[in-house]
Amino acid sequence: MSDTTTTADAAAEPGTGRARHLGWALVLISIAQLMVVLDASIANIALPYIGTDLDIGEANLTWIVTGYSLAFGGLLLLGGRLGDLYGRRRIFMLGLVVFAVASLLGGFATNEPLLLGARGLQGLGAALASPAALALITTTFPAGPQRNRAFAVYAAMSGAGAAVGLILGGWLTGLDSVFGVDSLFGVDLNGWRLTFLINVPIGIAAALLAPRFLPESESHPGQLDVPGAVTGTLGLLALVFGFTRAGEEAHGWGDPTTIASLVAGVALLVAFAVVESRVSHPLLPVRIFQNRTRATSFAVMMLVPAAMFAMFYFLSLFIQQVVGYSPLRTGFAFLPFSVGIVIGAGLSSNLVNRIDARYIAGTGSLMAAVALFGFSRLDVDDSAQALLTATNGHVGADLNYWASLFPFILLMAVGMGLTFVPMTLTAVHHVKAEDSGIGSGVLNTMQQVGGALGLAILSTVSLHFATRTGDDLAPQLAQAAGNEADAGTIGYLSFVGSFTDGATAAFLAGAVMILVGSLLIWTLLDVKHTELATDGPEGGVHVG
């Protein structure tokens, strides 16, 4: 009898020890996923402190974030397939240990190369652990309410991770010691270092407990598609790097390195597709995409999270640089997002047993689009006179959070919760057991590549409108100020007015992006709620 069958039988008997193990299994998987997701944002708030402490220039400082995203997004397919071939629990544990060791190295880093190397190693650990975690849910929890609830928790952790990272990062950077210890091995244990070191005990503990609560899958060593692994991984790395560089103001889409990276990425992925069509054990089996519902789910899970990640980026900058919030207050401003996505995920996990995924995810995506449209209406009086007379140097210091931000943050969160759970279910449902790791890897890859592409596109939109406004506003400010303001003040106030216009344009473009995803859901997602309660390859899911 397989592990999955045993788990299913125990799940029907809530009082059994095995059923209790399901709860602990979900706790382990959720903690791991939360740790992986929040690490993409937890270091953002600490960047200025890291730059000062390690003397890292502004240009290289962004690589602390980019390096992690690059390794994470580029290695996800490989990580998912390794789980299928060598055992998902084994790869999950390996990923957690690598992540914890990398976090330790980052926490004690005394120079730029060591810190950037640690961030890349964290990305590798995340790429191993994340698809294995999702595959373990698919293979450990029986189809129906048990699995739906597990996916709800997983989706809540995935969505809330960015907000939790902002809060945790803001809090940790303000601490001066750990349990009264100021330094260790000659390195100060304060501020930004804690954003790395906090992962060490969590990752190690989760890895040690995994054999007790998580079943191991069959292994198939010797079937690794090396040419596919090389071309696919390098292609994704080049693509994510190109999209990330395109979204940076200093480079953009016209930068030769950006163009070369994107062209190389496309060429390598074409080569990857050719390789996959000819090998007997491909890294990415074509059958993963042959189901219309699954292919639609992958596409939607690239578009919708892309807009969500961009929302965090632009809104966090807006409420810090325009409204004037501190880093910690900025983190707490996103706390309703964490609450809302838990509510939305819990609601959708119950509804998906009775209502088709199309209606739940379609409604959720429309709610998210409305929220982004609401953010696009954020406004400050950017006339020259209003900017010059602004109090405390921040134009929007009197912006009403509860009226202007809170409703849309909560609406976005609930909409994401309603969308993520059914879309995750439909993306991995009825994937063959031997492909569940790569299926999860594809889903995670779509989110990472979509996030990089979405941020690049929306940054381009933002820059265009910000530049246009800044060109018009700067001369007006200089004329209105006369001799009363210096060049620095004029430059700052011009930035405030132009950034607001750029950010709101990006929010509007993000709303359009989610509407495209919503259209795909309403028109192409064709799976009945009764089918999501069954197991077995390709069950009754319609193949388009």
Image (tube, rainbow, N blue to C red):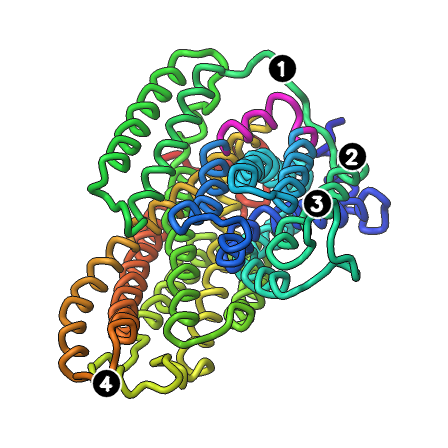
Q: Nearer the viewer, mark 4 or mark 3?
A: 4
Q: Nearer the viewer, mark 1 or mark 3?
A: 3
Q: Is residue 429 visible?
A: no
Q: Is residue 283 visible?
A: yes
Secondary structure under tag 4 reads loop
Kindly report the secondary structure that dominates the magenta region of the rendered protein. Answer: helix
Label 4 vs 1, first from the N-terminus: 1
Q: Amino acid at mark 1?
A: Pro
Residue 221, labelled with which disc?
Answer: 1
Residue 83 spot, x, y in % from top left: 61, 28
Q: Residue at 69% of width from left, 36% of height from top?
A: 97
Residue 478 spot, x, y in % from top left: 17, 77
Residue 532 spot, x, y in % from top left: 55, 45
Distance between the alpha carbons at the discs numbered 2 and 4: 69 Å
Residue 211, labelled with which disc?
Answer: 2
Q: Which residue is mark 4?
A: 484
Q: Amino acid at mark 4?
A: Glu
